[in-house]
Structure formats: structure tokens, C-alpha cells
Image (cartoon, helix red, strand yellow):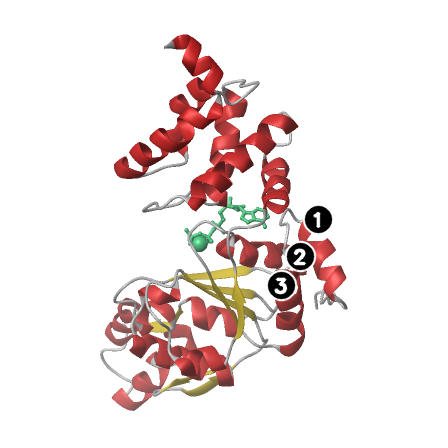
Amino acid sequence: MATDRTPSSVDEVSQGLREVGYLPGEATALVSFLATKLGKPVLVEGPAGVGKTELAKALARLLERRLVRLQCYEGLDEAKSLYEWNYRKQLLRIQAETDGTGWQDVQEDIFGEEFLLPRPLMTAIASKEPVVLLIDEIDKTDQEFEAMLLELLSDFQISIPELGVIGARTQPVVLLTSNNTRELTEALKRRCLYLWLDYPELEHELSIVRLHTPDLDERVARKLVEIVHRIRELDLKKPPSIAESIDWARTLLLLGAGDIDSGMFAQTMSVILKHRTDLDTVAARVGVMLDPAADASAA
Ligand SMILES: Nc1ncnc2c1ncn2[C@@H]1O[C@H](COP(=O)(O)OP(=O)(O)OP(=O)(O)O)[C@@H](O)[C@H]1O
Ligand SMILES: [Mg+2]
């Protein structure tokens, strides 16, 4: 048996997440703590690139558990998420048995566990050591899938017609993430703890950027985060997220930038903006703001 790594306080979770490279806000630390204590799944919602997926990975590192990930997409079904019968193996078994044994024996055999192909959800509850289960981007699936998931998340068991009910060997810590592209059902929400992750406060984001690029000059890092925060106030198709701030910081570090002046900004802004119209909007509003004096003398 693995040693019990369940933290005993919110502070311990907060500290522990930092140690594994994730800087949690207060709500994040609290909800993560409750998830490990109450055994309830956590639904993490928020815009793209704010650390939803990374939270699950960090929790797995903190709890020293394996991360089992189910990446959701449109049309995801039970065969790809729960289990599938291994048809090839079943077929081989049947062929190897052409004469002699009766069909009854073969049938009992080929619908045994040995012929099952476990998919992430089943892997997670059948695991001997408890895992962290990440159901990523649940909003990409449909409501039927959600309904199937409900049964699993409330009872931690899977019913297989040919085998019966398979109960959980261990209970996973479950995180579901959503980008909010559709409203999830109330039934699902009711079974989950809820965490809304948003773009962080300036100082918090600065700490995250510095954690990822400790070699970037602190003044440059601060200016970068200030600019990103101003850009988020504009009406954009896709505001830059933490992921873009980190990418930008890495870019500036690689370029050896000692400052972010309008020239450096113009050169690198495509790292944080991914739409033509956003580039135009930002160039007009932010480029000028950076160092008007230099711009004036260049003109
Ligand atoms: N609190 C944090 N501490 C440390 N790193 C963070 C934090 N939040 C976000 N990051 C970093 O930001 C990047 C984006 O995070 P992540 O991929 O988890 O975003 P996401 O919310 O899952 O986005 P999407 O909705 O696009 O999948 C990652 O590199 C992650 O390490
Ligand atoms: Mg993600």
C-alpha cells in the first residue's frame, strides 16, 4: 500500500501545490482540500488557459497518485471512455476452440475480465492504488454522456451486462474541466464541488510567470503582466491567458529583452494574440501607450 498522502489542512494543500509547481488561489486550495476529504468530484470551469488542466496534474503530483486522463470530444462514447470488449481476442479464443468444448463454456470465457479493454473511467476505479481522474473538457460531450458519467460519479461503479456490477477498488480524486461552451446539467453540477478559475490578480499572475521563467528580469516580467492585464480589458475575440503570458515571458527571455518598448511589443505581440482583428485592436491601443516619447522621436 502507498502511504497516505491526503493533506490535513487547506494550508497544507496550498503549500503542497506550490511545492509541485502550481500556485493556487485561495478558492483553489480550499476546493482541492475538500475534494481529497469529501470524495466529491470537482467541476472546474473558466476561460481557456487559466490552469484548469494543470490543477489536476498538480494534484496528482501532490498526492503522489497516477493521473488518469479522459480527453472529451464530440461523439465520445462508452466504448472509448469506459470499456470495450476485445473482439480480436474473443475471436481468437473462439477459433482456438472449434471442436470439443461447447458454446456455453466458450461464451462464459470470452465475457470474462480477461477479454475487457479498460478505458480511462474504468481504469480509474479499477486501479489498486487510488488515482487522480481528470475528465478534461466535459462540455465537448453531449448530455447522454453526462448522464452515464453521473452514475459512475455518484456510485463509483460500472454495470457491465455480461459481467454484472463492477465496484470501485479505490476511490479516485476526480476533476472535471469545462470551458463553458455549453451549460452542463444541474444533475451533474449537484454532484460536484464547483471551482471557477478566472484570470488571476496581477501579483498572482506575476508569481506564476516568475515561477515558469525565473531567469526573466523582474521588471520585464512585471511590465509584461501589466500589459497583459490592460489587454484583457479590451474587447477581444480571445484575450491572452496565463498560458500566453508564460509563452510571452519565454519569448522575451530567449530574445534577451531588457525592456518591453513599442518595438519589442510589435515584434512579439503575436505570441499573445491569436486573431488578426485582435492584433489590430491591440496594436492601435497598446503599442502607442508603451513609449510614446520614442515613437514621437522615431516619427
Ligand atoms: N496557478 C498556476 N500555477 C502555475 N502554473 C499555472 C497556473 N495556472 C496556469 N498555469 C500554467 O498555465 C498554462 C495553462 O494552463 P492549463 O493548460 O492548465 O489551462 P486550461 O485552463 O486547462 O486551458 P484550456 O481551457 O485551454 O485547456 C500551463 O502551462 C500551466 O502550467
Ligand atoms: Mg485544459
Callout 3–callout 2 Cβ contact below 8 Å:
no
Judged left or right of residue 195, residue 79 is: left
Q: Residue at x 27, y 71 (%)?
A: 87
Q: Nearer the viewer, mark 3 or mark 2?
A: 3
Disc 3 residue type (three-letter) = Ala
Cα distance between the residues tagged 2 and 1: 8 Å
Disc 2 residue type (three-letter) = Leu
**Residue count near mark 2 (Cα–Cα under 10 Å), binned few <14, some 14–19, many ≥20:** many
Which dot marks residue 152?
A: none
Q: Secondary structure at mark 3?
A: helix
Q: Is residue 32 above or below residue 276?
A: below
Residue occupied by mark 1: 19
Q: Quadrant of ligand 2?
A: bottom left
Front-lying residue, 117 or 251: 251
Callout 2–callout 1 Cβ contact below 8 Å:
yes
Front-lying residue, 157 or 192: 192
Say which quadrant the C terminus sits in. top left
Judged left or right of residue 46, residue 75 is: left
Q: Secondary structure at mark 1?
A: helix
Disc 1 residue type (three-letter) = Glu
Label 2 lies in ligand 1 vicinity (Cβ under 8 Å): no
Front-lying residue, 127 or 248: 248
Q: Secondary structure at mark 2?
A: helix
Residue occupied by mark 2: 62
Q: Residue at x 37, y 73 (%)?
A: 184
Cα distance between the residues tagged 3 and 2: 17 Å
Q: Nearer the viewer, mark 3 or mark 1?
A: 3
Residue occupied by mark 3: 27
Question: Is residue 290 in view?
Answer: yes
